Image (cartoon, helix red, strand yellow):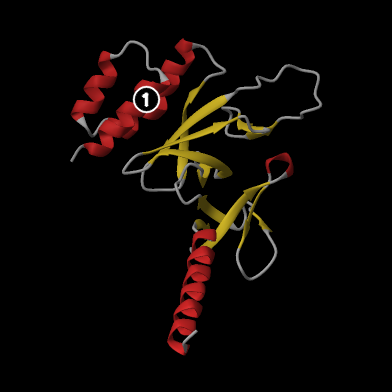
């Protein structure tokens, strides 16, 4: 085997290793200090999410040190927001991102209870807690979000919630606001369409 051929094989092996390492760390974590970390995300026991770089052990993602994280394909995309002006922090799933952001929180052991507090569910409690409770939030240019839809309250109450909390976000877009007013009942699907329509507008 000639020296040049040996070099070629060695270079190919190094390149493949580099590409493999790069592909391994295509997830992202954005810290509280706005640093972006290339990493590998993993979900462990009790849903705890950690991130790992090539420099050390996995690090637990917590509200106090991480503002956003997402997988390479953004199938998992989570952002820290603050609920209402009381600045109650929580992690929510990003459904739509743009001028108007739509978030969702579902199946967690904690939820916004509508009273400017963030209630934690005791999984050992005997009282009934909806297993599929889902809440949707919207926010514009800030990290403060408003709850606009809750599947644990009646349709009429949800409409009141939308009128009070969602409408102020879309009133500056005549087309979106008119479409909202024309709908008697706003489903989650329609809510998402309204947010996307708002973001597509000028």
Viewed as shown, does residue 190 lie left or right of 160? left
Viewed as shown, does residue 195 lie left or right of 47? left
Quadrant of the rendering where the C terminus is positioned: top left
Q: Nearer the viewer, residue 156 or 103?
A: 103
Crowding at dot 1, Cα within 10 Å, few <14 / some 14-19 / many 20+, comes out as: some
Query: Relative to 150, is 26 above or below?
Result: below
x and y, in percent, of residue 124 in the image: 81, 27
In the rendered picture of this protein, how many numbered marks are placed on residues? 1
Find the residue positioned furthest to the front. 1
Q: Nearer the viewer, residue 105 or 180?
A: 105
x and y, in percent, of residue 83 in the image: 52, 39
x and y, in percent, of residue 38 in the image: 51, 63
Viewed as shown, does residue 119 lie left or right of 67? right
Viewed as shown, does residue 85 lie left or right of 98? right
| SS under mark 1 | helix
Q: Looking at the image, which residue is at 38% across and 28% down?
A: 166
x and y, in percent, of residue 23 in the image: 49, 60
Query: Which residue position holds label 1?
Result: 191
Say whether residue 35 is visible.
Answer: no
């Amino acid at each position: 085997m000639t020296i040049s051929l040996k070099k070629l094989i060695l270079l190919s092996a190094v390149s493949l290793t580099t590409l493999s390492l790069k592909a391994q760390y295509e997830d992202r974590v954005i810290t509280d200090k706005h640093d972006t970390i290339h990493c590998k995300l993993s979900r462990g026991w009790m849903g705890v999410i950690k991130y790992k770089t090539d420099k050390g052990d996995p690090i637990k993602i917590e509200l106090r040190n991480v503002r956003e994280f997402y997988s390479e394909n953004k199938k998992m995309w989570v952002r820290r927001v603050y609920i209402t002006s009381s600045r109650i922090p929580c992690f929510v799933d990003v459904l739509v991102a743009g001028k108007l952001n739509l978030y969702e929180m579902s199946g967690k052991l904690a939820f916004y209870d509508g009273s400017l507090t963030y209630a934690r569910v005791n999984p050992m409690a005997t009282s009934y807690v909806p297993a599929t409770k889902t809440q949707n939030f919207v926010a514009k240019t800030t990290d403060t979000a408003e709850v606009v839809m809750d599947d644990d309250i009646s349709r009429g109450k949800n409409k009141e919630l939308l009128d009070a909390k969602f409408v102020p976000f879309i009133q500056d877009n005549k087309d979106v606001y008119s479409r909202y007013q024309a709908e008697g009942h706003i489903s989650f699907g329609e809510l998402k369409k309204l947010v996307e329509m708002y973001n597509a507008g000028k």
